[in-house]
Image (spheres, rainbow, N blue to C red):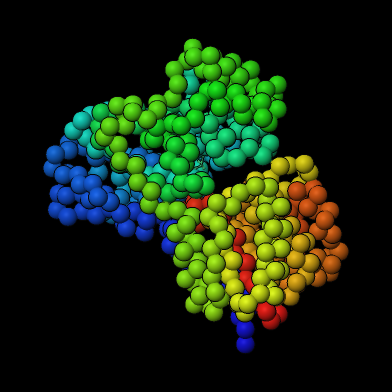
Amino acid sequence: MNAHPKDMLHEILGAALSAVAPDKAVSKYVSLDGDTLLIDDVTYYLNTFENIYVVGAGKGAAPMAAQLEEILGNRITDGIICVKYDHTVPLTIIRTIEGAHPVPDANGERGARAILELVANAGKKDLVLCCITGGASALTPALVEGISLDDGKKVTQLLLDCGANINEINAIRKHMSIFGSGNLARAAYPAPLAALIISDVIGDNLDVIASGPTSPDNSTFKDCMDIFERYKLTDKVPVNILAHMQSGAEGTIFETPKVGDPVFDSVQNLLVATNEQALQAASVKAEELGYTPRIVTSTMSGEARSVASDIAKQAQKASNGKTPKLCLLSGGETTVTLTGKGMGGRNQEMALAAAVALDGCPNIAMLCAGTDGSDGPTDAAGGFALPDSLKRAKECRIDPQVYLADNDSYRYLKSTGDLLQTGPTLTNVMDICITLVQHEPF
Ligand SMILES: O=C(O)C(=O)CO
């Protein structure tokens, strides 16, 4: 008998997540042999260092830090990480500070300042190791003088609601931050610093992931002003943030550290897990389940509902194609421009839009999932669009179009039983959309 499509989709997602688990990602690149610490191709002779500090931030920073404790034990002098509430694991030496995400809170600010203070003590004879994953931008909201956390929260919410992409959101965050945009590296300078980074952004740009705390910044104050104008936010953002960006664009405030700044001279930035790796692992599992895998893209972006209907169209076309059982894999991160008052997230909105577009097609099943286990301000990670999804909606007497128009994907999928709820996965490589297509009905 054929396995249920929902079970197969779960299995493929499980393989993808396991391939980018933070502890595995760290142990893949970091090893210790006596006094020799090897991080990718860079050797650190630990007997030449007086202290080793471990710091970090992001949804997956805790298991990364735990793995460093496993490898280095009590050679670690001290450490602090900032993680999202409920994203902790037991640690022995490294301290954990929990904060709010995606809209920051005072705990995150306290944590970020504590990290900056800790690494500021580090000198040339100390080694700073950083664990950086997505989520860190919101979890380390230490802002420049004159901009309050409340202002920071307001602008974050405006940017999240207007459909700005992560490059744009982070250009603004970086130009208000004393932690992101290379500022963590600046605080640690002149200590050698190695950052282990899990990417949750399209293109894996180091200066965008987590707002690039250890990376030269490629964005400018001028970009920030353009972004405010593009999304018509100039009249909405707090006046002191606008004034700050304006002064920067006019050259009266120093730009963020750029390529060539000596603070990056002894910095090693290393990507240890990416969306692409998750897609590769999903391909292997799909093949084991009898499907021909096809990675469509690892740069999926755009408005969630239109991306979903494009994938649905592609799947419908493929269902009449040559390959009897196909698994389409797309990775990336879409956006939702909020027009309704409902509740949901980009993956849930994709699943709802796909259910509508597929219109009960019996041979296509889709799963849209946030790899961090959290999609929008909900307790779900995403949703399914299954052959019988619309039938179940009918039974519940709910109209998918009405819910889609109100951006109310969470309540729709909850009613039909099509929510994906994994809880925090403690990793974060953006989103994955898995579509099973076959000639025969499931
Ligand atoms: O999630 C974050 O912190 C980002 O800004 C993208 O990595």
Check the picture and name the quadrant holding the N terminus. bottom right
Is residue 272 positioned above or below 8 on the image? above
Near-viewer residue (424 or 228)? 228
> Percent x, y for residue 73?
24, 50
Q: Which residue is drawn at 18% across and 33% down?
A: 125
> Percent x, y for residue 72?
24, 50
Q: Is residue 291 left or right of residue 278?
A: right
Q: Which residue is drawn at 67% across and 60% down?
A: 311
Query: Would residue 372 be visible to someone looking at this image?
Result: no
Query: Would residue 186 be visible to someone looking at this image?
Result: yes
Question: In the displayed image of the protein, which residue is found farthest to the top?
Answer: 252
Near-viewer residue (110 or 67)? 67
> Percent x, y for residue 179?
43, 30
Q: In this view, does 167 lie to the left or right of 130?
A: right
Is residue 253 positioned above or below 373 on the image? above
Q: Is residue 240 left or right of residue 68?
A: right
